[in-house]
Image (cartoon, rainbow, N blue to C red):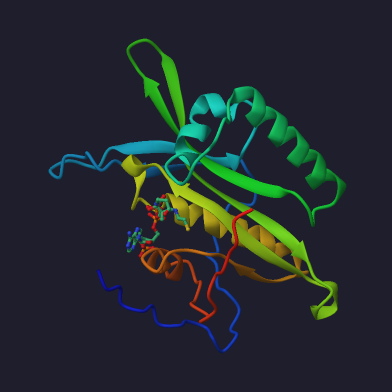
Amino acid sequence: MMVAPVAPVGLSGSPLQLPADLPQQLPFRFEVASPESNPDSAPARETFVLRPLQKGDFALGFGALLAQLSDVGDLDGAKFDEILERNEASLQRNDAWGVRTLVVVHEVEHQENGTENRKIVCSASLLFEQKFLRGGKKVGHVEDVVCDQNYRKRGLAKRVIQQLLGEAKQKKDVYKVILDCTEANSAVYAKMGFFVTGEVQMRVNL
Ligand SMILES: CC(C)(COP(=O)(O)OP(=O)(O)OC[C@H]1O[C@@H](n2cnc3c(N)ncnc32)[C@H](O)[C@@H]1OP(=O)(O)O)[C@@H](O)C(=O)NCCC(=O)NCCS
């Protein structure tokens, strides 16, 4: 299938405009209209929470979500917690290293028995690369963006990425954020302010 090229937006170097109402603090609770709403009545709302990835999130489906993106290898709950701990230590030592991962958790309350189900349905990460160029500023890299197939096109990935971009912008020493994606997905990122640069991704496998 031929994919129409996404028109470059902001190639002139104009700074990214983010929504004025980005949450100042996480966790942040928000509601989205349920896709199963009856068109004849007020739309049912579903509750989500945007927050940093935390210990125990493997049990909330983080591994299963990542598996919708790529091979997760032998990741299990213990290994997940170990990687997270190592990463948190890096972040605390120096915010130029380490990966900041935000997730969206879907919260479902079961009125009948008063229990609550929680499931991670969307995630994206941002990491920073320290440059010698540009007076020692940093480049942000967005990685591992994935939304559960049953929750797509409801604005969840956009929320996560805009939050990460807001955090990067606040740092003042990050001059750009870049990502790699398929041509088909470039339409999604164009909706968040990214533009196609004309560079190509190359790789070797190790
Ligand atoms: C790509 C992906 C992360 C998008 O997640 P999502 O939560 O559905 O995206 P959003 O709902 O936040 O969409 C943001 C915008 O892109 C649009 N969009 C979403 N999917 C789209 C698609 N396949 N084609 C064109 N536009 C799309 C939405 O309509 C929305 O536009 P709007 O701001 O005008 O309303 C999701 O489809 C996914 O996880 N895919 C599989 C894994 C993957 O490819 N990850 C990306 C790796 S680079």
Which residue is situated farthest in the bottom direction here? 12
Decide if residue 121 is in sight here. Answer: no
Which residue sits at x=59%, y=41%?
Answer: 51
The residue lying furthest to the left in this view is: 40
The spot of residue 79 in percent (x, y) is: 65, 28
Q: Quadrant of the N terminus?
A: bottom left
Q: Residue at x 87, y 46 (%)?
A: 93
Q: Position of residue 168 (x, y in %)?
A: 68, 62
The quadrant where ligand 1 appears is bottom left
Q: Is residue 140 above or below residue 198?
A: above
Q: Is residue 199 above or below residue 114?
A: below
Is residue 132 toward the left or the right of residue 159 in the image? right
User: Residue 73 or 168: which is nearer the viewer?
Assistant: 73
Question: Could you tell me which residue is drawn at 28 percent across and 37 percent down?
Answer: 44
Q: Quadrant of residue 109?
A: top left
- Residue 61 place in picture, x, y as percent: 48, 30
For residue 86, side relative to residue 50 (left or right): right
Q: How many marks?
A: 0
Task: Name the residue: 67% across, 64% down.
Answer: 140
**From this viewpoint, which residue is outermost toward the top?**
113
Q: Nearer the viewer, residue 179 or 205?
A: 205
Q: Quadrant of residue 47?
A: top left
Report if residue 44 is visible in the image.
Answer: yes
Against 143, residue 50 (above or below) is above
Residue 148 or residue 193, whichever sits in front = 148
